[in-house]
Amino acid sequence: MTTQGSTATTKRKRILQGLVSTAIVVGIFVGVMPRIASYGDVWDTITAMTAFELGGLFLFGAWNLATYWFVLTAVLPGLRIGQAAVSNQASTAVSNSMPGGGLLGVGVTYAMYRSWGFTKADFARATVVSGIWNNYVKLGMPIVALALLALSGEANAAEIVSAAIGLGALAAAVVVFWLMVRSEGMARKVGERFGRFVSKLRGLVRKPPVNDWGSSAVDFFRRTGELLKERWLRISVAALLSHISLYAVLLVALRNVGVSEDEVGWVQALAAFAFVRLISALPITPGGLGVVELGLTAALSIGVDEVLDAQIVAAVLLFRFITFFLPIPFGTASYVFWRRNTSWRQEAPDEPTDAVA
């Protein structure tokens, strides 16, 4: 297969992915959501909110946008908070607006980090550590939510078993990562196996195999271990704060549209939020558009009347507007700022990357 043929195939796949994503989004917002609540009733609910309620909700949303900057500065020593803000907002805008945007967002972050003088290994380490810690929190939150439901007597046996399985999976993931960081043999084995897999993929497009990813993996995880030894607590607190802040936006949206604690409790909202976050990790649509809205609405509106249905849909749509759509214009402005601002630019070292990069 030629490189040109591979490029054409990739373009066709992206077009097909875009068409499928669009069909899913349209189907959800046009065919499914109006069956749950009339958009007219939803709009009436939103317009009935006071300026104080709307302003408070947007302030929570702004705080949530800022919390992930602390994660980025924690996993990448030397990254300034302003740089974290620019890179995070720009990559989020790409991820939320384009099919397959997650990978493109990583590419934007890479270009920015390199322009600021960070090495390929720095970028790879920061991306891997932040991704792993985010997934730890995503796996942990449903377990916490189910435990809280069990304590309140609202969880059934199946949900308790699910929590136990999830806890086991989280523990296994932590142990495996710890072994790779602590064990040179484990890191080398993982690097060699992954290197053989990548070499096969490169062979399909007539590129030479990669070299000695076992040693590269050993060096990568050794340096990762040094980073975690110094900053594991800071990284953990920052990641947890980011996810809790996102949940807080949903909870404030519910309360500000008139959904009381008796109607939808904070534990129920946490459970819905946590499980939908897991589902949204699948790249079905850009940023989980449509999937998240439907999942949250379905989870929060079980057994409620039509008035409460409209309030819940209003809260979910406000939550998604603030956390999904609002970052797009800010991210576009951040990208333009990065392109024009030269004061942060530094010469990026031309060094060989390691395995994970």
Image: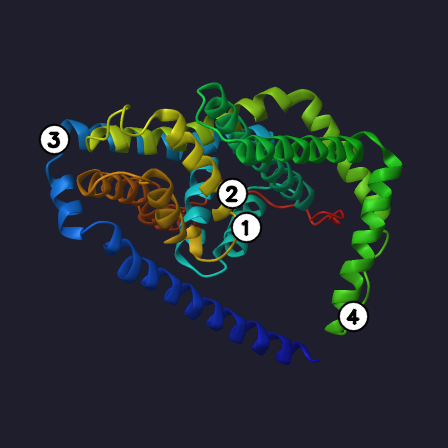
Q: Which residue is mark 3?
A: 50
3 or 4: tag closer to the N-terminus:
3
Task: Report if the CB atoms under discs 4 and 2 are less than 8 Å apart.
Answer: no
* Disc 1: which residue: 106
* Label whose residue precedes the other's in the sequence (1 or 3): 3
Q: Relative to the observer, which residue lies in front, 114 or 192?
A: 192
- Say which label, 2 or 3, has the lower sequence index: 3
Please state which of the two labelled residues, at mark 1 or mark 3, is closer to the viewer.
Answer: 3
Q: CA distance from mark 3 to mark 4?
A: 61 Å
Which mark is drawn over residue 278?
A: 2
Instruction: Judge from the rendering whether residue 225 lies leftward or rightward of residue 127; answer left or right.
Output: right
User: Amino acid type of disc 1?
Assistant: Val
Q: Nearer the viewer, mark 1 or mark 2?
A: 2
Q: Amino acid at mark 3?
A: Thr
Which colour style is shown? Answer: rainbow
Q: Are marks 1 and 3 in contact (CB under 8 Å)?
A: no
User: What x and y, as percent, mark residue 66?
Assistant: 40, 32
Q: Is residue 332 above or below residue 182?
A: below
Amino acid found under the numbered disc labelled 4? Gly
C-alpha distance separating marks 1 and 2? 20 Å
